[in-house]
Amino acid sequence: MNDSQENIVRNMLAGLSPKDFLKIGMDEIAYVRPLSVRGVEKKVFGVYAADGTQLSVLDSMDMAIATMRHNDLIPVTLH
């Protein structure tokens, strides 16, 4: 990237509101984390959108990741 392109990107980013920043990655990234559910002995895994909205609960980490990939989302994990 040359200096002119960097300046264009900096100016664009400087014009984003906090609400705009929250939308970055919404349609591309999802995260999975283990959940404890009262009354359920087995660990389950929640899948969440980039903004923290819960999308699904699945029985295994592998199934959660496969589901995200099937829906064209980039999976990330939180511990």
Image (cartoon, rainbow, N blue to C red):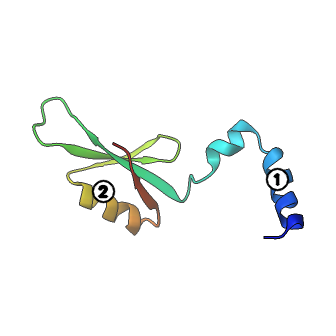
Q: What type is the residue that disc 1 sits on?
A: Arg
Q: What type is the residue that disc 2 sits on?
A: Ala
Q: Write the residue at 78% across / 50% down.
A: 13
Read off the residue under disc 1. 10
Judge whether 1 appears above or below 76 on screen: below
Q: Quadrant of the N terminus?
A: bottom right
Judge whether 58 appears above or below 42 on screen: below
Q: Write the residue at 26% across / 60% down.
A: 63
13 or 24, nearer to the observer: 13
Q: Quadrant of residue 69?
A: bottom left
Location of residue 71 in the rendering, given as x and y in whole percent from the top left corner = 43, 65
User: Alpha carbon of mark 1 to alpha carbon of mark 2: how far?
Assistant: 36 Å
Q: Write the residue at 53% across / 60% down.
A: 28
Q: Write the residue at 22% across / 35% down.
A: 36
Location of residue 56 in the rendering, given as x and y in whole percent from the top left corner = 34, 48
Who comes first in sequence, dot 1 or dot 2? 1
Badge 1: how crowded within 10 Å, few (<14), some, or many (20+)? Answer: few
8 or 24, nearer to the observer: 8
* 8 lies left or right of 79: right
Element type at mark 2: helix
Name the outermost residue toward the top: 38
Element type at mark 1: helix
Location of residue 65 in the rendering, given as x and y in whole percent from the top left corner = 33, 60
Judge whether 35 appears above or below 63 on screen: above
Q: Nearer the viewer, mark 1 or mark 2?
A: 1
* 62 lies left or right of 73: left
* 67 lies left or right of 4: left
Disc marking residue 25: none
Disc marking residue 64: 2
Name the outermost residue toward the front: 3
Q: Quadrant of the C terminus?
A: top left
Location of residue 70 in the rendering, given as x and y in whole percent from the top left corner = 38, 68
